[in-house]
Image (cartoon, grey):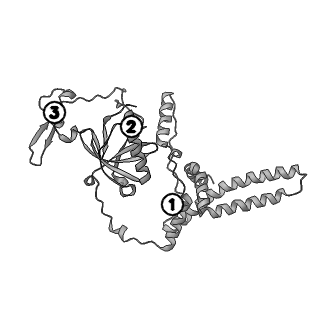
């Protein structure tokens, strides 16, 4: 991984030579623009509208035009004279509680690597931020722009997240229909139950960019001369289309979620029953297998009904998360065939 910025990190009189590395990357498939008729690549040229000549990138400057139509040309040499752009320092401005920074301000993330000789000061700052549960608000220049950033602990390293300036966040006025909307206690109760049924610990690795996966399958199939997917007709409106009442929609969602958890716990019950039958068979067939089957069924039902509790919720949500997308897609087809 190649660094994209070299400089120093300073807080007080302590200075730490550091490098910045991009912490994220896009996994999108890259495409070329081509002529659909013959597959020829599309090429763009920078043409001057005054002389009509093709202009090389090195000969291009920037121009600013004000409201009166007056324009001024700025070259790379002009930008290099700005004092802020010459700074090679990430300067700590203050240390603040992490929860005070609105996530909407965050932009890009970078790993901060110290020089070998400054490892001790780097570790000291990292451990201090970790123990105080604070974030360092920093300022630095990156790519011809003064950046505001949040220096935070990320695992065993420090990372800086650039932040947008306050005037870059748009104001949004809530419509009157939203301010005037009211909800009942029953709706709040059902919504809380539905939230509890989905409650779990966030594990980002459990989620997949399905569009990119399917896009790569489509490309591979095209390269082999075939088709990866068959165009499907729009799904017929199922029972969900009949729900026009918010409370009814919540109740149906809770019921559906409970059914998924019951199916998961029922599978465990069947496994326990199978074990019980094997044990009773070895003991000489004393007739306990039927009792075992009833006990397992009752146990599975009890766990399904208790899905809104903290323990049952986590296990149910974890078991059903991976299959929820497929299950929801398959249900309308099943009803259609019936």
Foreground: disc 3 or disc 1: 3
Q: From the viewer's perspective, is 306 left or right of 241?
A: right
Instruction: Give the residue at x 65% y 61%.
Output: 304
Q: Name the one closer to the observer, 336 or 102.
A: 102
Which numbered circle lies on residue 202? none
Report how far apart the C-alphas of labels 2 and 1 lie in the structure: 54 Å
| Viewer-nearest residue: 181 or 275 | 275
Q: Mark yes or no: residue 326 visible.
A: no
Q: Secondary structure at mark 2?
A: strand
Residue 133 appears at what percent x and percent y? 42, 54
- Which quadrant is the N terminus positioned in? top left
Q: CA distance from mark 2 to mark 3?
A: 30 Å
Write down the residue under mark 1. 241
At a point 49% along the width and 73% down the height, the residue shown is: 185
SS for dot 3: helix
Residue topped by disc 3: 77
Residue 237 coordinates in the image, percent (x, y): 52, 56
CA distance for labels 3 and 1: 63 Å
Whether residue 277 sits left or right of residue 94 in the image: it is: right
Q: Residues within 10 Å of mark 3 (few under 14, many from 20)?
A: few
Residue 21 x/y as whole percent: 37, 36
Q: Residue at x 51, y 60 (%)?
A: 241
- Local packing at callout 1 (Cα closer than 10 Å; few below 14, some 14-19, many 20+) is few
**Dot label at residue 113:** 2
Q: Earlier in the sequence, mark 3 or mark 1?
A: 3
Q: Nearer the viewer, residue 174 or 221?
A: 174
Which residue is rendered at x = 53% and y = 67% of the image?
190
- The kind of secondary structure element at disc 1 is helix
Examine the rendering and report whether any part of residue 261 can be seen.
yes
Q: Estimate the x, y position of residue 113 in percent, counting from the top left.
A: 38, 37
């Amino acid at each position: 991984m190649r660094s994209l910025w070299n400089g120093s990190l300073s807080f007080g009189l302590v200075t730490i030579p550091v490098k910045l590395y991009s912490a994220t990357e896009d996994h999108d498939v890259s495409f070329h623009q081509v002529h659909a008729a013959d597959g020829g690549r599309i090429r763009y040229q920078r043409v001057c509208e005054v002389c009509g000549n093709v202009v090389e990138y090195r000969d291009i400057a920037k121009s600013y035009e004000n409201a009166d139509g007056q324009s001024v040309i700025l070259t790379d040499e002009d930008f290099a004279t700005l004092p802020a752009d010459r700074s090679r320092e990430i300067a700590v401005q203050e240390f603040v509680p992490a929860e005070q920074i609105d996530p909407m301000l965050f932009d890009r993330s970078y790993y901060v690597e110290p020089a070998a000789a400054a490892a001790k000061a780097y570790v000291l700052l990292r451990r201090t931020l970790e123990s105080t549960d604070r974030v360092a608000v920093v300022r630095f220049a990156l790519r011809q722009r003064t950046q505001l950033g949040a220096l935070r602990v990320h695992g065993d390293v420090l990372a800086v997240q650039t932040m947008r300036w306050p005037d870059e966040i748009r104001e949004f006025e809530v419509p009157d229909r939203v301010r005037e909307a009211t909800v009942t206690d029953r709706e709040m109760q059902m919504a809380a139950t539905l939230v509890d049924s989905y409650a779990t610990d966030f594990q980002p690795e459990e989620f997949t960019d399905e569009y990119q996966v399917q896009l790569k399958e489509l490309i591979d199939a095209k390269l082999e001369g075939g088709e990866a997917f068959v165009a499907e007709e729009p799904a017929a409106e199922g029972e969900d289309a009949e729900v026009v009442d918010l409370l009814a929609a919540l109740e149906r969602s809770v019921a559906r979620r409970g059914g998924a958890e019951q199916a998961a716990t029922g599978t465990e019950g069947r496994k326990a029953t199978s074990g019980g039958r094997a044990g009773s068979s070895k003991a000489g067939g004393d007739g306990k297998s039927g009792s075992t089957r009833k006990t397992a069924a009752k146990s599975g039902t009890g766990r399904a009904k208790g899905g809104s509790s903290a323990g049952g919720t986590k296990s149910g949500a974890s078991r059903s998360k991976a299959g929820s997308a497929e299950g929801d897609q398959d249900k309308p087809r099943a009803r259609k065939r019936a």
